[in-house]
Amino acid sequence: MWLCECGEIPQDYCVHHIDGDYNHNSIDNFALMLASEHEKLHTDNYTEHQWKKIKEGLDNNRDKATEWHKSDAGREWHSKKAKRQMENRKYREYVCQVCGKVYTSRSIGAPKFCSNNCKSQWRRLSGVDNEERICPICGTKFIINKYSKKIFCSRKCIAKNRRNS
């Protein structure tokens, strides 16, 4: 009815039945509303029974939706959607938190580093990857980056290990 009488419905809008009767489809019973306002108008007036039915419907479909999203078709859909979103993202300027260099990125979120080198340097300096180890020669506890291959606390213990070998 709306399309015939008034034309296209603008994006983010929907047609609302003013009197709440979905069977009363005359043009004077229609109002154009933002979809978000329309949804809020109706959900504020839902009864407990209506909310229960909605929850049951969602619960029944959740497993099916999960299954579809894990399928080849679902993965392909997500891949295409992500590519479209990245193509449409605008480049923004950011300042690297390590070196202070200004760089551009269209990453989602706020990137902190201009390169993987700066990111690695920040991780080393902040100690986020540190762990405690125990020297097998002297039993001293020492802090070291978890990616380090060192197993001894000092050069002295390394030398003792060589002499004992």
Image (spheres, rainbow, N blue to C red):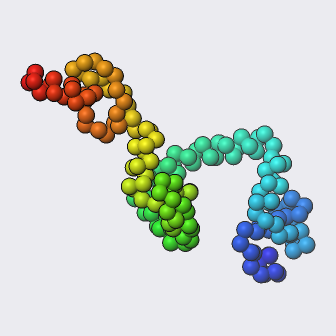
Task: Decide if residue 161 is on the left or right side of residue 110.
Answer: left
Residue 105 can be seen in this image: no
Return the x and y of residue 29 as percentages of the image width and height: 89, 68
Residue farthest toward the front in the current orientation of the protein? 156
Quarter occupied by the N terminus: bottom right
70 vs 116, nearest the viewer: 116
Q: Quadrant of residue 26?
A: bottom right
Return the x and y of residue 84 as percentages of the image width and height: 51, 70
Q: Which residue is found at the position 10% from the left and 24% from the top?
A: 163
Return the x and y of residue 101 as percentages of the image width and height: 49, 63
Quarter occupied by the C terminus: top left
Task: Decide if residue 78 is on the left or right side of residue 45.
Answer: left
Task: Decide if residue 64 is on the left or right side of residue 47.
Answer: left
4 vs 41, nearest the viewer: 41
145 vs 19, nearest the viewer: 145
Residue 118 can be seen in this image: yes
Task: Decide if residue 55 is on the left or right side of residue 74.
Answer: right
Q: Which residue is found at the position 46% from the left and 50% from the top?
A: 67
Q: Which residue is found at the position 34% from the left and 36% from the top?
A: 146
Is 87 located above or below residue 95 in the figure? below
Instruction: Give the number of callouts.
Output: 0
Return the x and y of residue 25 as percentages of the image width and height: 84, 69
Q: Which residue is found at the position 42% from the left and 59% from the top?
A: 115
